[in-house]
Amino acid sequence: MRSFNRIGLFSKQEDPRIADTLVQLHTFLTTQDFTVLTTHTVASFVGTSPSFTDQELASQIDMAIVVGGDGTLLQVGRLLATEDIPIIGINLGRLGFLVDISPEKLDEQLHAMLEGHYTVEPRTLLQTEVYRGDTLLGSRNALNDVALHVRNDVRMIEFDTQIDGHFVNTQRADGMVISTPTGSTAYSLSAGGPILHPGLNAVVLVPICPHTLSHRPIVVHSDSVIEILLCESRNVDSRISFDGQSNLDLLAGDRIVIRQHPHKLRLIHPENYDYYQILRTKLGWSTTPP
């Protein structure tokens, strides 16, 4: 008995380079007698009708296939995680830490996975609330990271950090990246943070260009509640970004509360998936000589 029957296809918005892969994928799935539903973007490439918005599609499928790069999967993943819908990623981007099936092996790998030869990997999400006084400015989810950074000027932000109600420090920096293990190979890594295995129940806080060099990245349990307060003594226009795809503008005195989201994203990998092989390939690490 198949694990999945109704498959939704998602893709990078309005990118004609993916048309051939989408047509190949749609043909493969329909010839295997799966029910295939598509977003408006995918439908414009493969000629299907009817089509749906991402939100409409999420309520009608039991598995999703995302064609594009990591950015596309991040966007779709935030939506589908709360619906507990697993995702397969087909890589048409650049690095592709999350989308691990290549178009060249699409039929071979996908056929095996749809026949039950796959592994499921849960990935942590963060949920963030931003307050100005007692007013909630907004709430967002992130699969990679939440990043506090300067908005316009090249100036440092001053902010206090608390973890589980305990004061950690006050620091001046260009900002802070609060990253899941998934995001530890993204902005966090560029800012000097460690690579975290995606199976860890952990979150890393990485200062961006701190004024005091003793302010180093710190790894905490994913159950921790992280609070960041922008100091009123230094009124620098700043912004908070979620996976680099949505933003909220901040003022001095605003408070940011970050905690683990109650849902996890479920990524589906080929049966022979090897995280360390992904790191070697994507980061150009050398291998042991024979």
Image (cartoon, grey):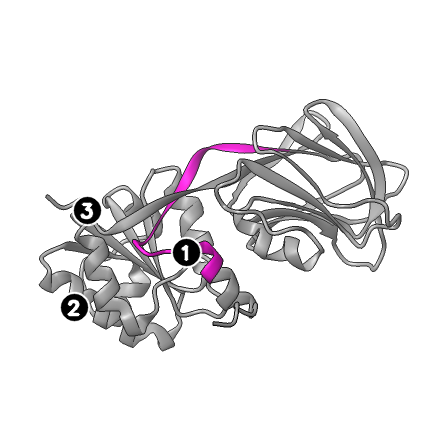
What residue is at 22 percent from the left and 72 percent from the top? Answer: 24
- Which of label 1 and label 2 is nearer to you? 1
Residue stretch in magenta:
258-277
The label shown at residue 27 is: 2
At label 2, counting other C-alpha atoms closer than 10 Å, the crowd grade (few under 14, some 14-19, many 20 or more) is few
What main secondary structure does the magenta stretch of the protein show? strand
Amino acid, disc 3: Phe
User: Which element carries disc 3, helix, strand or loop?
Assistant: loop
Give me the C-alpha separation between circle 1 and circle 3: 23 Å
Q: Decide if residue 100 is on the left or right side of residue 240.
A: left
Badge 1 is on which residue? Answer: 274
Q: Is residue 4 left or right of residue 142?
A: left
Identify the residue at image location x=43%, y=38%.
Answer: 264
Front residue (pair 285, 215):
285
On screen, 4 above or below 277?
Answer: above
Count of numbered marks? 3
3D distance between C-alphas at marks 1 and 2: 29 Å
Residue 99 lies, in percent from the top left, at 40, 60
Camera-side residue of 274 and 114: 274
The residue that mark 3 highlights is 4
Q: Amino acid type of disc 2?
A: Thr
| Residue 244 is at least partly visible in this image | no
Q: At 20% across and 69% down in the image, what residue appears?
A: 47
